[in-house]
Image (spheres, grey):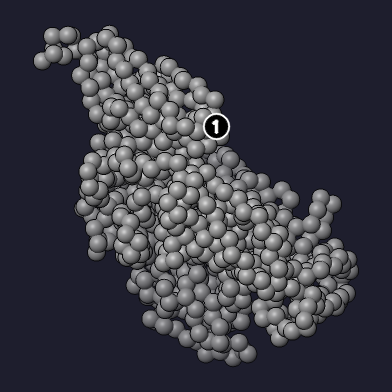
Amino acid sequence: MPGISNRNSLILFVALFAALIIPACTGESPPVTVRVGPTDIPGGDALGAQDITVRNSRLAVAFAVDTAPPWGVARGGIVDVAVVQNGELSVDRASLVDFMPNDWSDWPTSYQLVTVEKQSADEVIVKTERDWGVTRLVTTFQIRAGDDKVHIVTEMTNTGDTALEALSSGYVLWPDGGYIFGIPGLEGLQEGPATGALATWSAFYDRDWAFGLHARFDDRINNGARDRYLLHDLAAGESRQFEAWLQVNDRGELAPFVSSAIDLEDLPSGSVSGEISAANGKSVAGAVVVAEKVTGTGSYPYTWALSEGGAYSFRLPAGSYRLYATAKGYANSSEISVDLPAGESISHNFSDLRPPGDLRIRVVDEETGKPLDARITIEEGVTPLISYFGQATYFTELDDVGEVSLTVAPGMYRLRVSSAEGFTAAPVFLDVEVAPAEVRELTAVIDVVENPVARGWYGADLHHHSDVLDGYTEPHFVLRSELAAGVDVSFLSDHDSMVNNAEMGRLAAERNIPFIAATELSPSWAHFNAYPIAAGETISIDVGNATVQEIFAEARRMRAGVVQVNHPYNNYGYFRALENEVVPGGYSDDFDLVEVSSSTPNDETIPAVWALWNEGRRIYFSAGSDAHDVWNEVSGAVRMYVHVEGEFTIEKFIESLRKGHSYASAGPLVYPETMFGSEIRHVANDPLPLDFSVRSVRGLSSVTLIKNGNAVQTRNFDDTTALTAVSFIAQPDTDSWFSLVILDAEGFATYTNPVWIRTADRQSAAQ
């Protein structure tokens, strides 16, 4: 995930008033207060002696002054956000709210100055000054009494002698957990131009909170609109101003963001109100009214308002909408179309909500009848817009293996049930109709066609996150997802944290699956997995300020057997940072593995590792999904298969990884006659047979033999799903290496580690 900061020095200053300052308040709202020191936000990260927490009657935010922000970001931004309700602070719900000078690129900085510029009962202004290379950044954060918003303004000035081109600058809002709505009109868009946006706000939410980011300057988004950017140049001496509002709501609805946008942008508006009930006339707890915006190209989710006591009311900009009511598990009401003129109020009652039904699903192995861990996705049927009402993805239980119960709206469904899909089994599909209040019981039978463990091959997703920082997945769902993916070893690597490793280990032990505890060391310019990490270890350095040598040394100090370079060629990848010459300390080769990732392209990674092998460097592949949100990403989509002789232990697994007795796979399986990572002495120019057994449940397409980074022989197949013998005859004339690239019928690939060949004359080879 993102990372940002490379500092040579650090200047921190805070205007200190007292440990806790509560000025007298003469207005109707309780005063705005300033606290200097560790934040009192429950679960907050701003725990430094000079950190600043500002609070009013609606919200509280904490600024990282001498606490290191996540991902190596320069200090001075907001690292904690909490709802204040009835005078009580809720838990921290955010990892970072801040200005980014150029997306998640490295951030060279020499100073950060944080001051409380203004403080009164009615208003507090915090100012952050810092540099980004030759660029000066000055950001003010204004919090007013009784307001549910933080007003943020940044001035960005190029103090250098040359223009800065093609920058992506703007604000980021990264919640802790919850769900992403994004920008109306762009729902589901992860990154790209903001063309088609129907509003200037983006939203993130859960049952009892919602955050909005109002920003009118942006023309592109990233990370599902958690990042709001403007693509721009900045001439020498030029300044540019950016403005945004962070809005905090204490309910899981988006209507307040629409109301604020109407006021902030002075939009013509009207209102809609009425009541909601089920078809039997009873009120429905937690029911909402959803508004879809109608444009010339279609109808798009726009906002929703929660009801209270069956009644709802909310504002909308003047325009055309489709409205319907819904609730958890209920079928949507009938839709109505409305043209809302400015200044008008429309009333409509929704009274035909139909109650939910239940699906109880068992998943079993076709041959043995034993229960299987599985992932169930709704391919066709009702999937709620509001994610806390239900999602499209479910997992079988940890305790009741192979079983899951779903509460769903009445209707027709097509379900995809998968267990180790694409690796050892194909998915099956179930078609079912669910009536209101009905309970349907179904059994999904999976044909498991391969068992790598029986041959000593163990699969693991060696890059996986939970609900720390940018993650959205609680540990028990991480394990459920990994088990459904069919991995044999569980794994967890959160950013600069081991907080969930103990819980993950406990859950894995209860399911009798081995667990590897890890952490992802995450400076701005690169991310590295370190594992296994012994229980009780903590990170003792400021990762954001450390050199690469210090980071690798810290991994070894924590007794990590492996240091893995993650996504080496993305914006915060080690190999890319080396190309850009932004790695503090320069190059270090004290790493063991390089990741093949399912979250970023590998077209540069593969040849880069081959080039290392050509230099004789025995640095091998690893593989991981980098999954953060298992409901929208697939655990184990790419994984490492590692060969372990005899009884399995974590120590043997790690040692085999280090020796290259392994391969990275997005589906195809391979069993070599000569172990990957091994070395063969061979007579130069004599024929060398290289034999493998290969299988893909999606259908085998091709197997290519790679010699010293070049494809030398290819075998093509007619999408066979059977276990297939593949033989090559090589004639190495010098020291060399051979590996495989295997493709299945859907383009999923396997990349093996090499077999090393040391050539000699016949007499030397005989000795």
Q: Secondary structure at mark 1?
A: loop
Q: Is residue 565 above or below residue 144?
A: above
Residue appearing at x 34%, y 23% in the figure: 691
Of 198 and 309, the residue lying toward us: 309
Of 416 and 621, the residue lying toward us: 416
Q: Is residue 354 above or below residue 500?
A: below
| Drawn side of residue 342 relative to residue 330, left or right | right
* Residue 542 in sight here: no
Q: Which residue is mark 1?
A: 745
Q: On the image, which quarter does residue 505 sit in? A: bottom left
Residue appearing at x 47%, y 86% in the figure: 22
| Drawn side of residue 517 relative to residue 342, left or right | left
* Residue 712 in sight here: yes
Residue 594 at x, y = what percent? 36, 38
Residue appearing at x 32%, y 42% in the figure: 454
Q: Is residue 356 above or below residue 616?
A: below
Residue appearing at x 43%, y 17% in the figure: 713
Q: Residues within 10 Å of mark 1 (few under 14, many from 20)?
A: some
Residue 618 at x, y = what percent? 27, 31
Residue 245 at x, y = what percent? 62, 66
Of 14 and 457, the residue lying toward us: 457
Q: Is residue 733 above or below residue 411?
A: above
Quadrant in which the C terminus appears? top left
